[in-house]
Image (cartoon, rainbow, N blue to C red):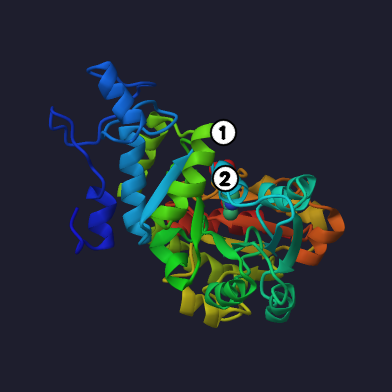
Amino acid sequence: MSENWRMRTRLVHEGAARSAFGETSEAIFLTSGFVYGSAEEAEARVADRAPGYQYSRIANPTVRMLEERFARLEGAEDCAAVATGMAAVHAALFSQLRAGARVVASAPLFGACQWIVTDLLPRFGVESELVPAADGEAWRRALSRPADLVLVETPANPTLELVDIAFVASLAREAGARLVVDNAFATPWLQRPLELGADLSVYSATKLVDGQGRCLGGLVAGPAALLKDSLRPFVRNTGPTLSPFNAWVLLKGLETLGLRVEAQQTTARTLAGWLEGHPGVRTVRYPGLASHPQAELARRQMKGPGTMIAFRVGGGRERAFAVLNRLRLVKISNNLGDTRSLATHPATTTHAKVPAELRERLGVSEDLIRLSVGLEDPEDLMADLDRALAP
Ligand SMILES: *Cc1c(COP(=O)(O)O)cnc(C)c1O
C-alpha cells in the first residue's frame, strides 16, 4: 500500500486485500481452515516455505486485513489482533516474562490489568510494583534498579492522569525493560506511543476502534521481530484468537475512527468546561482543561485531550448514585468509547475489586463519575446532566 497516505485515507483503504470477486467492502472469511492443492503444498505452507493460510487460529485473511490497517495507523511494523483487550494485555506480558522477572506498572490501571499485575504475575514468580502515574520521582526510584517490563496506561482509567511516555521510556531503557503502553483511551488518532519510545502499544479495540458497542477485540502493535518471535507463538498456541467476523466489524469501525474521535472530543471539551462551572460538581478531570495538573504534558504528547471526562460530585457514593440514576439520555454502562454517552461509578464497577484503601489513594473516590462522551448533540447531553446534577 502507499507510503504517503495520510491517516484519514489509511483508515478507509489500508490493508484491504480483495478476493477474485473484486468486492468493494472487505470480505469476511468466516472459515476455520483452508484447503491445500496437494500434500506437498500443505507441508510447504506449514514449514513457512510457501505463502498461504493454514488454520484461523494461526492467521485468517480478514483478521490480517485488520492487522495491516492498524499497524500502518500506529506507525508500527506489525500488529497482532486478538479476541479482547485483556487478551492483548495478557499476551503482551506473558509472552515476554518468565519467573524471576520484574514488572513496574502505572497506577491506576484498568481493573483487570491491575489484577494481572498484582495478583496473577506474583503467582508465577514475577515481582511487580505499582507507581502513581504522575509521580516522576516515584518512576525514577522504581526504575533505578533493573526491570524487565514496564506497563503504563495513559490517560489512566478512570482518573485521567497521564504518564509521560517519553520520560518513562528513557527510564525503562536504562533499567533494561521493554515499555508496553495501553493506548485504549487515546487511540493512534490522538497518541502514538511507539514514536515516544514505547516498544509495544496495546488496545482494547472494544472501545473506540469498534466505537459502536458491538464487539470485543484487542490489538498489539510493535516491531515485526518481537511479534514474530514472542507474541505470535504465544497467541497461536494459547488461542485467544479474534473471530474473522469481529475483525470485519472492527475494520468497519476504523473507517470512521477519526471522524468519531474528533466529534466526540469536541463535545467532551464543551462538556468538561461546562461541568467545571456547574454548582453541582466539585472537580472535573479532563486533559484539555487548564486545571488538569498535566495539561502541558497532554498538549505535548497527545494530539487532543480525548473523549473521556471524570468528575466528582461530592457527597460520596450516595450522591454519585443519585446523579447516575437521574440520567435519562446518558446510559449507565461500564463500556466506553461508544457513540452513545455512557456514565459509570468506577469505585463500585470497573474498580470494585481494587482494595478500598488503594482506590482512595489512587483518586478513585466514592463520588467520582466517569463519563464517556458520545456523538449526541451536546445541548441534549448538557440538559440531561444538568437535571441529574440538581441538588
Ligand atoms: C476496556 C479496557 C481494557 C480491557 O479490554 P476488553 O476489550 O474489555 O478486554 C484494557 N485496558 C483499558 C484501558 C480498557 O479501557
Could you say where residue 165 lies in the image, as x and y percent from the top left?
54, 72
Quarter of the picture holding the C terminus? bottom right
Does residue 211 appear anywhere in the picture?
no
Between residue 198 and residue 4, name the one nearer to us: 198
Graded by Cα atoms within 10 Å as few (under 14), some (14 to 19) or many (20 or more), the crowding at tag 1 reads: few
Give the number of the disc on residue 268.
none
Does residue 18 appear anywhere in the picture?
yes
The image quarter containing residue 187 is bottom left
Disc 2 residue type (three-letter): Ala
Graded by Cα atoms within 10 Å as few (under 14), some (14 to 19) or many (20 or more), the crowding at tag 2 reads: many
Between residue 2 and residue 217, name the one nearer to us: 2
| Residue pictured at 73% horizontal, 68% vertical | 131
Could you say where residue 244 lies in the image, as x and y percent from the top left?
38, 30
Q: Are marks 1 and 2 in contact (CB under 8 Å)?
A: yes
Q: Of callouts 1 and 2, which one flags the residue occurring earlier in the amino acid sequence?
A: 2
Could you say where residue 24 lies in the image, as x and y percent from the top left?
17, 36
Which element type, helix, strand or loop, lies under badge 1?
A: helix
Could you say where residue 29 lies in the image, as x and y percent from the top left?
31, 27
Between residue 283 and residue 107, name the one nearer to us: 107
- The relative height of residue 297 versus residue 201 in the rendered view (above or below) is below
| Residue pictured at 79% horizontal, 45% vertical | 123
- The relative height of residue 24 versus residue 97 in the rendered view (above or below) is above
Q: How many marks?
A: 2
Disc 1 residue type (three-letter): Thr
Which element type, helix, strand or loop, lies under badge 2?
A: helix
Q: Along the horizontal axis of the image, is 12 left or right of 352?
A: left
Q: Name the residue under label 1.
A: 238
Q: Mark 2 points at which residue?
A: 91
Cα–Cα span, label 1 and label 2: 9 Å
| Residue pictured at 57% horizontal, 63% vertical | 178
